[in-house]
């Protein structure tokens, strides 16, 4: 397979669609009664219903089908072959569908899924979908088709929707990743977001927030040597690269990181403790979008600056082993947005706080949650 990027399906791609959906359906067997589900529609049958079909891979290993129902877009199916699950392909397909709808002017995108299967409703919640009850009347024919096909007998089904807003400009933000070595391996300090938040509700995140005007008004002093290194590290950031004063832009995101850590954890850091790590922009379609500059910092267990949950945006904050967060994320116990999951996987491969703090990867902007190969090489080889 040459690419994990979604693209519009060609007629040749459609031949694989039915087999992929049938194989994906069998994954439900341990948790649902799938005996009466029958044979999925062929790719040609899906194409005949209109809308658009997106695929990933050559040969194809996953697809998404978006149809139009009474002038509204509906995500009729997302399926990934079991041999390629847990590689971010489902996320890639959903975001590609959202991007396509945004390019068509936005609106809303609905779907129908199992409420209690971890890789169904909880997964879509991390991508901005919310349960709709009662269901829109226009979806009743689709729900009736599902009932006739035995889906509702297998488990509780819910309608979910997310608004897709075209043309939202991302706002600059910062997220700080505190790391340390614990008894169970590499640990990170995370927050459990309040479920009523309008961005990433209920998700596990790192401390941080948007750049505020005060951060540009009172930026920290930075030595010439450190500034040279930071300008090189953030050279691809649109926030830094497009600024009239790039040095001020760098000092501003440092100020944001220092302020957010103090406000949300009670920890006062020094400028040199904030190390550039990553650069992710919220995919199109969200009513709020951010370009997040991720930084890492070391806070060993014997550091007297012990972080506390000092923000109303989080129900709780705690140190957790990286491996445990990833395992609980896969099981559906924790909600992980794609940037968080990818960063944690990279940290897990590095294995220790010392390795993380010595890594110095080049932050390369990530759009549509397409992160590329990881772990990344150091920008300071040797």
Image (spheres, rainbow, N blue to C red):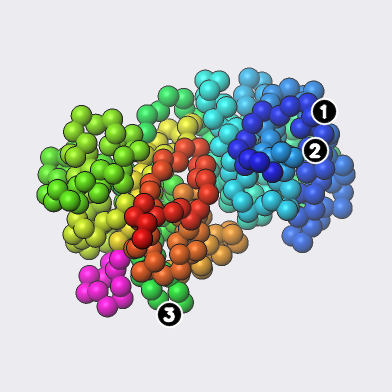
Q: Position of residue 242 (x, y in %)?
A: 28, 30
Q: Which residue is mark 3?
A: 183
- Closer-to-camera residue (200/112): 200
Above or below 105: residue 159: below
User: Viewed as shown, does residue 99 lie left or right of 264?
Assistant: right
Give the magenta part as a residue range: 298-310
Q: Position of residue 46 (x, y in %)?
A: 78, 29
Q: Earlier in the sequence, mark 3 or mark 2?
A: 2
Badge 3 element:
loop
State the residue at coordinates (67%, 32%).
54
- Closer-to-camera residue (290/251): 251
Q: Quadrant where the N terminus lies? A: top right
Badge 1 element:
helix
Q: Earlier in the sequence, mark 2 or mark 1?
A: 2
Q: Which residue is mark 1?
A: 44
State the residue at coordinates (50%, 45%).
371
Q: Give the mark toward the camera: 2 or 1.
A: 2
Magenta span includes 16? no
Q: Is residue 235 among the parts visible in the rendering?
A: yes
- Disc 2 packing (10 Å; few <14; some 14–19; many ≥20): some
Q: Position of residue 28 (x, y in %)?
A: 75, 55
Q: Are marks 1 and 3 in contact (CB under 8 Å)?
A: no
User: Viewed as shown, does residue 129 lie left or right of 141?
Assistant: left
Q: Is residue 160 among the parts visible in the rendering?
A: no
- Closer-to-camera residue (130/181): 181
State the residue at coordinates (82%, 43%).
19
Badge 2 element:
helix
Q: Position of residue 152 (x, y in %)?
A: 76, 46
Using the image, tell me which numbered label, if any, was put on residue 16.
2
Distance (Cα) linking label 2 and label 1: 10 Å
- Specify the quadrant of the image occupied by residue 378: bottom left
């Amino acid at each position: 397979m040459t690419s994990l990027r979604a693209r519009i399906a060609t007629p040749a791609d459609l031949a694989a669609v039915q087999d992929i959906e049938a194989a994906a359906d069998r994954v439900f067997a341990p948790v649902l009664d799938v005996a009466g589900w029958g044979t999925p529609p062929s790719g040609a049958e899906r194409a005949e219903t209109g809308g658009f079909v997106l695929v990933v891979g050559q040969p194809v290993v996953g697809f998404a089908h978006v149809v139009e129902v009474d002038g509204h877009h509906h995500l009729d199916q997302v399926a990934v072959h079991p041999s390629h699950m847990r590689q971010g392909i489902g996320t890639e397909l959903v975001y590609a569908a959202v991007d396509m709808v945004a390019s068509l002017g936005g609106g809303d995108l609905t779907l129908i899924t199992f409420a209690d299967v971890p890789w169904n409703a909880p997964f879509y919640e991390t991508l901005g979908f919310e349960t709709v009850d009662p269901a829109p009347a226009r979806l009743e024919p689709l729900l009736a088709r599902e009932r006739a096909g035995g889906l509702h007998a297998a488990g509780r089904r819910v309608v979910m929707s997310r608004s897709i807003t075209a043309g939202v400009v991302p706002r600059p933000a910062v997220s700080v990743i505190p790391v340390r070595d614990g008894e169970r391996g590499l640990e990170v300090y995370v927050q459990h977001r309040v479920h009523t938040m309008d961005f990433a509700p209920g998700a596990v995140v790192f401390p941080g927030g948007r750049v505020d005007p005060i951060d540009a008004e009172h930026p920290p002093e930075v030595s010439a040597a450190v500034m040279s290194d930071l300008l090189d590290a953030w050279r691809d950031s649109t926030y830094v690269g497009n600024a009239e004063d790039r040095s001020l832009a760098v000092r501003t995101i440092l100020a944001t990181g220092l302020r957010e850590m103090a406000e949300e954890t009670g920890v006062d850091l020094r400028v040199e403790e904030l190390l550039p790590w990553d650069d992710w922009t919220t995919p199109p379609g969200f009513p709020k979008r951010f370009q997040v500059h991720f930084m890492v910092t070391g806070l060993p267990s014997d550091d007297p600056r012990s972080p506390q949950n000092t923000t109303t945006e989080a129900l709780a904050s705690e140190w957790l082993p990286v491996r445990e967060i990833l395992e609980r994320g896969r099981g559906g116990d924790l909600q992980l947005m794609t940037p968080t999951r990818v960063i944690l996987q990279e940290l897990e491969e590095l294995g220790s706080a010392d390795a993380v703090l010595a890594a110095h990867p080049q932050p390369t902007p990530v759009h549509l949650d397409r992160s590329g190969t990881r772990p990344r090489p150091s920008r300071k080889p040797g």
